[in-house]
Image: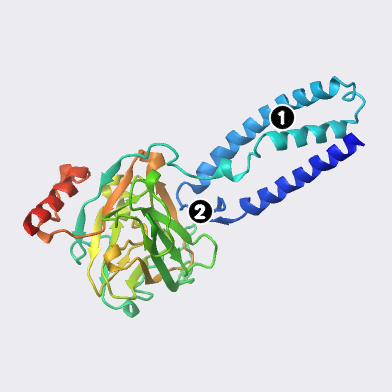
């Protein structure tokens, strides 16, 4: 009777564990198996795969150790050898489930690159968005209604072999449009792309403070110190079409761009941030590296943008923390127009931004 009730108790615990695991594991956005809000784009898939491989390897080792332990415990009472094979397997599984976390549990697969000391931040220079400064990257937009196909660029579908596309095909999907929300949640900057019908439309864009100290406080609510810059951990581009951002409130915003000509050999020094003035929007070419847009809290902590993009919405990303062991620090303000143009050798040094902001403070005094 004792073994019967003990077995029932263990089975109930096992099913509770399975329910708990499935309930949290499949609450996901952007492929993230985590109960918390979306943690971003770039390191989701690769980091989960690597951790699952390590988790499965550890799970196999634990199975061997736990099987031996269970066998010795049951063998002391002479029960192990008398048990059927499937009963021994079940007992080992239950013991392992109760004593070790599952390799697919959220604690094993949560893609958090900042569990320890965060990587250093590289300063990105900022310029005023003008037709001249945006040359090769995109255009300044006065009226989004003027930016439709064929002016809005859609790239033809790539061919596998030597045969070419039939004329007029490969780019017929056109564009799609909708709302793109940019909002602060404490020290975290999020983006929500309502234009996309899939679930991979909620992004952690960056941090307003050191990532290990960043805390959420609710949508539209700032942290204790309003951020003057945002720390980016990834960037991406769309090979299938361009993208247009236009603020519905007409207020300024910041975008961070790198030319499509660098291709996949992107580096931090290729990026330049652009301050888009009030009443303007920005259109970027297909292949232009970017990462949505950013808002200074002074212009709003919860803003909406009109977004137009290609319907295919292919995306290629770089994870700065994984590939370059660094973050990109993008200013959210434009200190002084006369001090924007930072010299090329020092454009990635944190002192560059600090120097011309210090000059601004001296002028105010």
- Disc 1: CA contacts within 10 A as few (<14), some (14-19) or many (>=20): some
| Residue at figure coordinates x 37%, y 74% from the top left | 150
Determine whether 255 is above or below 105 in the image. Answer: below
Q: Which mark is residue 157?
A: none
Residue sitting at x 43%, y 53%: 316
- Label 2: few (<14), some (14–19) or many (≥20) C-alpha neighbours in 10 Å: few
The image's colour scheme reads rainbow
On residue 161, which mark appears? 2
Q: Position of residue 331 (x, y in %)?
A: 25, 55
Which quadrant does the C terminus fall into? Answer: bottom left
The count of marks equals 2
Q: Under tag 1, what secondary structure?
A: helix
Quarter of the figure with residue 140: bottom left
Observer-side mark, 1 or 2, equals 1
- Up-down relation of residue 192 to residue 86 (above or below): below
Quadrant of the drawing holding the N terminus = top right
The image's mark for residue 63 is: 1
Along the line of sight, which residue is nearer the eye, 29 or 243?
Answer: 29
The answer to whether 326 is drawn above or below residue 205 in the figure is above
Is residue 292 rendered to the left or right of residue 299? right
- 105 relative position to 69: left or right: left
- Taking the image as shown, residue 215 lies to the left or right of residue 198, namely left
> What is the residue that sits farthest to the front in this orientation?
2
Query: Is 315 placed left or right of 63 in the picture?
Result: left
* Alpha carbon separation for disc pair 1 and 2: 48 Å
Residue 77 x, y percent position in the rendering: 88, 21
């Amino acid at each position: 009777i004792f073994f019967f009730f003990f077995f029932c108790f263990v089975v109930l615990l096992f099913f509770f564990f399975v329910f708990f695991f499935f309930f949290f594991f499949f609450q996901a956005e952007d492929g993230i198996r985590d109960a918390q809000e979306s943690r971003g784009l770039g390191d989701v898939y690769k980091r989960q795969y690597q951790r699952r491989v390590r988790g499965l390897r550890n799970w196999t080792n634990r199975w061997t150790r736990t099987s031996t332990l269970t066998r010795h415990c049951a063998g002391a009472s002479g029960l192990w050898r008398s048990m059927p094979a499937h009963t021994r397997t079940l007992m080992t599984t239950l013991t392992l489930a109760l004593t070790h976390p599952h390799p697919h549990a959220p604690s094993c697969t949560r893609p958090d690159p900042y569990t320890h000391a965060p990587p250093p931040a590289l300063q990105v220079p900022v310029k005023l968005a003008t037709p001249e400064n945006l040359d090769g990257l995109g255009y300044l937009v006065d009226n989004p209604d003027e930016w439709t196909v064929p002016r809005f660029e859609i790239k033809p579908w790539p061919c596998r072999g030597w045969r070419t596309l039939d004329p007029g095909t490969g780019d017929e999907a056109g564009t799609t449009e909708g709302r793109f929300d940019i909002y602060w949640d404490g020290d975290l900057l999020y983006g929500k792309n309502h234009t996309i019908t899939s679930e991979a439309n909620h992004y952690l864009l960056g941090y307003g403070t050191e990532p290990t100290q960043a805390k959420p406080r609710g949508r539209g609510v700032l942290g204790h110190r309003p951020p003057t810059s945002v720390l980016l951990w990834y960037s991406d581009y769309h090979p299938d079409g361009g993208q247009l951002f236009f603020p519905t409130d007409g207020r300024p915003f910041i975008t961070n761009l790198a030319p499509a000509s660098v291709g996949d050999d992107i580096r931090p020094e290729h990026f330049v941030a652009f301050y888009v003035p009030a009443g303007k929007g920005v259109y970027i070419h297909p292949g232009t590296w970017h990462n949505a847009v950013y808002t200074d809290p002074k212009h709003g902590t919860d803003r909406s943008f009109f977004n137009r993009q290609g319907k295919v919405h292919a995306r290629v990303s770089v994870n700065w923390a994984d590939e370059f062991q660094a973050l990109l620090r993008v200013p959210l303000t434009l200190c002084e127009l006369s001090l924007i143009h930072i010299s090329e050798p020092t454009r990635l040094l944190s002192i560059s931004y600090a120097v011309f902001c210090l000059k601004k403070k001296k002028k105010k005094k």
